[in-house]
Image (cartoon, rainbow, N blue to C red):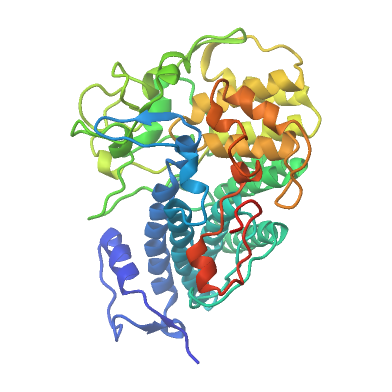
Amino acid sequence: MKKYLYILFLMVLALSSCGKMLDGISPKGAITTDKLSDSDIALLSNGVMHQFEAIVSNLWFEGDYLAENYAAGPGFSFSDTHAETQSAASSTALSRWQYCYGKLQYANLLIDAAKKGVSADAKEALGVGYFFRAYIYYNLVTRYGGVPIIDAPTNLDASVTRASEAATWKFIEDDLDRADAMFTSAGTQFSSFAYVSPEAVAMLRARVFLWEGKYAQTVTEAGKVIGSAALSLSDNAADWAKMFVNGSASKELVFAPVNVRSTDYIRLFEKVNDTDGSWNYSPVPALFAGLFADKAVAADDFRKAPTFGEDANRVIKFPNGQGGQFVANPAPSESPLPVFRVADAYFMKAEAQWLGGSVDDALLTMKALMEKRYATVALPATMSDSDFETLLLDELQREFYAEGRRWFDIKRLAIRHHGYVSATDYSGGDFTTWIKTVYPGNDSYAIDGWNDRHQLMYWPIPQAERDKSYGALAQNPGYEQ
């Protein structure tokens, strides 16, 4: 039975950016995958990139929101952030689940189509499909633990069971291996941050390995990016700030879809720096006042001015094209979406070196990064574990504030360094004490009042999805009804 590829919408999106029409395709809304030429597959890959942009933006602000990096913006309010993810009936947990699995269909359709191609373009498209699918599953497993693995176009309402967390991570690794093999076969090299490249695969691999506690592999993959001749760190505020503007030529960007559309623009600035006087999120006052303060080991952080302006209610990291911004942004609606940047490779390498047992090597890696960000850096030759962790968390917050990272960085360190091991083993370590040091004086992070600390680490499987599966989707511990 032939599988039909319903790609009219995708083709319209692809063609709007390519400026030409496909000829001789009929019917327009249903094309069998064996009728697609290699050039058609390349266009389909462009269309799928629009779906990648959509999932990036949908998940963008979550890590900062859950980490309480934001106060309510003008004309906006929100309540207990974590309460929104702590019920099996939660709309947040359900919407993220459905959104990820909805976009998974596009990745699987592209893979299904591109497998039939033989050209370098078809192989690159197949690599993009595998990369996109790996990225989707990375976002699922870091929220829910083990999830259903769907590796072909199918009915998403079908009854499926959860894979184990280990099996889900393995599936992600396998997809990245497949993507890497396709790019190698096609001879793909880094040409622009707008495209998926071998360096982008290395970045996602490094992040996956770091979450899994595979530290030697993390160092290797991060090293591929750090050593790339096409990429380098900025050493001044203006160049750093230009990563987030339309027309960027930044060598810091490893992968950042360019967000060039005719409609349905993805405007990151609208949530934190809108032009109409009303937006969702403002900086927490303490962060606005002190995030970039001098410290004993480094002074004069140039990231402050491009992140916060004079208005304590705005994050100007994503310039809106009007006054009060650090850099001009002539077309803010078409700014890139930075998924991976070079700085993250340094952070992942340093974290892996530290957790792998060499804080001294980790400090050398951090020093190489920090010397590009500060006027003066005076790191010691060695540090205690706790002092290095404090340094790492502080630098991650400075570098990636408002980029959706914070809660997931905290969660990863809780898993790997503070006794919280997995979905089935979360009984030891000093997690409760540590989380209170990360959020001093904030009772919402004291474990009292939640069923157990498992609820900090894993979201519930949405009850609506469990109902559709007739109970085949097992619930995470702590959420059983």
18 left or right of 122 in image: left
Q: How many marks?
A: 0
Percent across and percent down for residue 104 are 49, 65
Residue positioned 49% across, 34% down in the render = 252
Residue positioned 26% across, 33% down in the render = 320
Percent across and percent down for residue 33 are 45, 81
Percent across and percent down for residue 383 are 75, 16
Percent across and percent down for residue 25 are 30, 83
The part of the image, by quadrant, that contains residue 271 is top left
Depth check, front residue: 198 or 169: 169
- Residue 412 makes an appearance in the image: yes
* Quadrant where the image shows the C terminus: bottom right
156 left or right of 172 in image: left
4 left or right of 472 in image: left
Using the image, determine if residue 405 lies above or below residue 293. below
- Residue 125 makes an appearance in the image: no
Using the image, determine if residue 359 lies above or below residue 269. above
Using the image, determine if residue 303 lies above or below residue 455. above
Residue positioned 54% across, 37% down in the render = 407
Residue positioned 72% across, 57% down in the render = 166
